[in-house]
Image (cartoon, grey):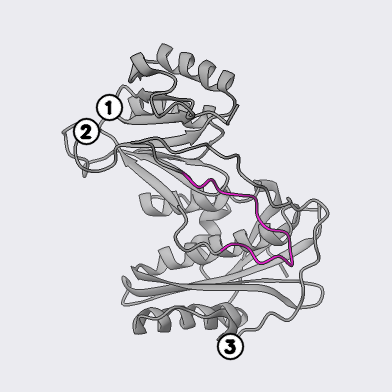
Amino acid sequence: MPQQSTPSAGRLLYVEADGGSRGNPGVAGYGALVRDPDTGAVLDIDAQPLGRASNNVAEYSGMIAGLRMARQIDPDAAVHVRLDSKLVVEQMSGRWKIKHADMQKLAAEARAILPAGQVTYEWIPRAKNKDADLLSNEAMDAGASGTAWVKETSGIKVTGAAPTSASAPAPTTAPDAGPIAPGARETEPAGAAAPAGVVPPRRRGRLHHVEIWVGDLEVARSSLGWLFQELGYDVSGEWSEGTSYQGAGEYLVLESGPHVRASGHDRLSPGLNHMAFHAGSRAEVDALTEAARSRGFALLFADRHPFAGGRNHYAAYLEAPNGFEVELVAEPA
């Protein structure tokens, strides 16, 4: 029986996940599945090699994959996560402190997938986690051989169809940002999860997260972090050397620490020049630009604002106090 009660709202889904590392760190991979607890049917599976990683990273990665599958099947379901990693269960349940920065970021990513009240965690013996264990070993085998894991040839089969949730989000089409002007960068916003029964677009090649190293974390939190939240990102994790901000799919990280060199960011040097965000209507871009300037952001290309990116591209180019450039792009008029 579960060690703690599951949430009462919505129907119940089980997530079973596992991860492993041959060498710790070494060739790593995870496996995860979503099960209907009433019928025992497997509703979906996932497994992926992770390259060289630790066992704990693989365990967390499996749990994250399982939570995302459960959210896609039914975003309102109560989700009960069953793992054979005592460490992950105790940390995610809040009973053990998470000390390692990498684990803090992974835990924050997991907690941002579904509301906390919908998810509970249970430790189970490895013998009761055989399906997820098999999936994780398939992923590690694939990683060791340099091949991709193939769902169709997995030893674990999807045996039940996931009922379509009445509240599942419908596919959305992102607004067209208009013609891309010289120097501008086109972004591909994350869409809503596909309803059950619809094959979602593949994740390979899509943006997963962006990690920004900064010299002064407090300055970054009060400038870039503020802007991320104004744009709809939520703080999903905070630790002594960083903060993570969860978006619709991808997430952003501001991080400092002993590994960050003392030299500041120079947007004109080789490397990342700027990040561009959809920022709503022209009026919303204007309002956010003024608010940002009051917090120390500088307006770039002021003589050509708001069409510095081209006559059909309404946007504000701003430089944060720490030198990072962001672009706020308006929807087409």
Count of numbered circles on the image: 3
Q: Is residue 100 visible?
A: no
* Residue 216 magenta-highlighted: no
| Label 3 element class | loop
- State how far apart marks 1 and 3 are (Cα): 51 Å
What amino acid is found at the position of numbered circle 3 in the picture?
Gly
Q: Nearer the N terminus, badge 1 or badge 2?
A: 2
Q: Position of residue 153 (x, y in %)?
A: 56, 87
Residue 305 lies, with reference to residue 8, above or below; the image says: above
Q: Kindly check if marks 1 and 3 are in contact, taking CB atoms under 8 A apart as contact.
A: no
Q: Position of residue 257 (x, y in %)?
A: 26, 40
From the viewer's perspective, is 218 left or right of 244?
Answer: left
Looking at the image, which is closer to me, 16 or 128?
16
The residue where tag 1 is placed is 323
What amino acid is found at the position of numbered circle 1 in the picture?
Gly
Crowding near the residue tagged with mark 1, few <14, some 14–19, many ≥20 C-alpha atoms within 10 Å: some
What amino acid is found at the position of numbered circle 2 in the picture?
Leu
The residue where tag 3 is placed is 155
Looking at the image, which is closer to me, 174 or 128?
174
* Residue in the image at 40% along x and 29% along y: 309
Identify the magenta region: 187-201
Number of the label disc, if any, that sits on residue 106: none
* Residue in the image at 21% along x and 41% along y: 258
Q: Position of residue 231 (x, y in %)?
A: 53, 31
Q: Position of residue 288 (x, y in %)?
A: 51, 20
Q: Nearer the N terminus, badge 2 or badge 3?
A: 3
From the viewer's perspective, is 60 left or right of 117?
Answer: left
Residue 242 lies, with reference to residue 23, above or below; the image says: above
